[in-house]
Amino acid sequence: MSSTDSTPDRPFILICNDDGIDAPGIQALATALDGHGDLCVVAPEREQSAVGHAITVRDPVRAHRYEFEVPSGPIPAWAVSGTPADCIKLATHQLLDRRPDVVVSGINRGPNTAVNILYSGTVSAATEAAILGFDAVAVSLCSFTRDEYEAAGRFAEQIVDRVLAGGLPPGVLLNVNVPAYEKSEIKGIRVTRQARSRWEESFEARVDPFDRPYYWIAGKFVNLDDGDETDLEAIENGYVSVTPIQFDLTAYEHLKSIRDWQWNGEE
Amino acid sequence: MSSTDSTPDRPFILICNDDGIDAPGIQALATALDGHGDLCVVAPEREQSAVGHAITVRDPVRAHRYEFEVPSGPIPAWAVSGTPADCIKLATHQLLDRRPDVVVSGINRGPNTAVNILYSGTVSAATEAAILGFDAVAVSLCSFTRDEYEAAGRFAEQIVDRVLAGGLPPGVLLNVNVPAYEKSEIKGIRVTRQARSRWEESFEARVDPFDRPYYWIAGKFVNLDDGDETDLEAIENGYVSVTPIQFDLTAYEHLKSIRDWQWNGEE
């Protein structure tokens, strides 16, 4: 019997995250998706927040079978020693004998809005899946303290079903952020763009017992975007934010102006 | 005397990388830029390849002064215990008392073309600089074995001077890849887009002396793009590739079609 024994006519859903396989968010996500397809979890064995799109190239990666239960029973699961992007690569090329119909990453503890998308391991798992040609969704809960994963799980269900029914354009994945409220308090879904923002760092300098300085990162998040239709605006107004994002980073609208620099005549 | 004592009317150039402060590529970059402004190096103390846009949030970061020489003499330098993105944050918010006019990251050992942009620590240092509002350039040499950093340094000079003279559009940085030839063999500069591509992973499964399996990532890079004007095409044809890239990941051209999914009527 295959480790991913399943019903071929049901969709196959691969679940990952960056908070680690024991985090409440991934349990809530798998529980929410129970009944929507054949589920499988391949997730980091330890927390991997803020790893961005790191991959493990200088060390080997390990994977071990893991017990993971959803309401309908146990599902196949592996805990991986690497990053979220490693999990997706290893799952789809080595561990699984069936191609996922969708890859869902989350539910992240804390928002992955605005520039935080770039630092997020949760988003990078979904991005890696999209690079490999799979439909992919990242889901984050906009709170570090309130464990309101249930509503986020309900929206994840709805969005994943919609992706399974219609598919996503090639090279595009969905970055979903859910306000930390009960579902009845959430006003609906808005399709948004990534807000312009940055972290204004204020490193806290300390001195260790051996008189050597060290620094803690202690930044303040700053929204630089007063325009409409951003992910931050949707969350602030009580909506779920769904941002279609891409991994082609080319600044197409500036190609022409930078070509006009006449590079080769200047030497 | 300030640690970044300098001539205010000369541009201030911050240099970073991901191969580590002792790598030949960063030495070649600083040597090439000697005379183009006041230089400063803030780079990881150890190799940080493939870290993507990781930042260090759970541990403190350390920085210690480092000896770094260019032909005109010593320049201020710090070795940092964190990632390339950490280096830029720490440099611009804590270590330096002057705002860089441009941040240059590299010269990376190996290409950062196509989808490799997403995994690259070298590019992430430049991206972090751009997020923080600085003009930024990432420079990579398209070889893992040939140490032809001199030509790459010459093109870095030319491109950095051009950026210092004219500036970059907000939110845009330049990702530069240089073929591993002598300068006379390189045909010129092309402004390009990021090629569609992926790594087709073939994990090599092994068993350790304790009978536990582990996996080495052993992927093959695949160019999926047969269109014109890509970074890969420029390199293959002997040109330097300059790709303007951005950190706004929104898939703008798909916003409308995904809005048309009529999310809020479906429940």
Image (cartoon, coloured by chain):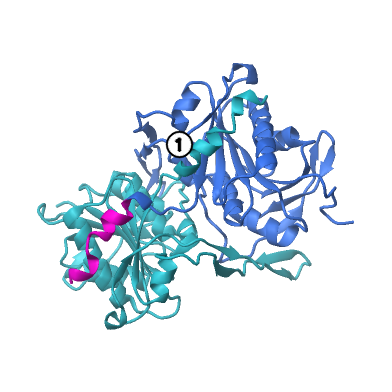
Chain colours: A cyan, B blue
Q: Is residue B152 magenta?
A: no
Question: Position of B67 compared to A234: left or right?
Answer: right
Q: Residue furthest right?
A: B1
Q: Residue furthest top?
A: B185
Residue that appears at 82% across and 33% down? B71
Magenta segment, which residues?
A: B254-267
Residue named by callout 1: B193
Residue that appears at 76% across and 45% down? B11
Question: Position of B94 compared to A116: left or right?
Answer: right
The quarter of the image holding the C terminus of chain A is: top right
Most common secondary structure along the magenta stretch: helix
Q: Is residue A22 visible?
A: yes
Question: Position of B5 compared to A36: left or right?
Answer: right
Indicate the position of residue A50 as horizontal and vertical percent values. Answer: 50, 61
Observer-nearest of B202 and B243: B243
Indicate the position of residue B12 as horizontal and vertical percent values. Answer: 75, 47
Observer-nearest of B65 and B15: B15
Q: Is residue B61 above or below residue B165?
A: below
User: Dot 1: what SS?
Assistant: loop
Observer-nearest of A221 and A3: A221
In which quarter of the view is residue A16 placed? bottom left
Indicate the position of residue A177 as horizontal and vertical percent values. Answer: 37, 68
The amino acid on which the numbered mark 1 sits, given as a three-letter code, is Arg
Q: Is residue A68 visible?
A: no
Label 1 neighbour load within 10 Å: few <14, some 14-19, many 20+: many
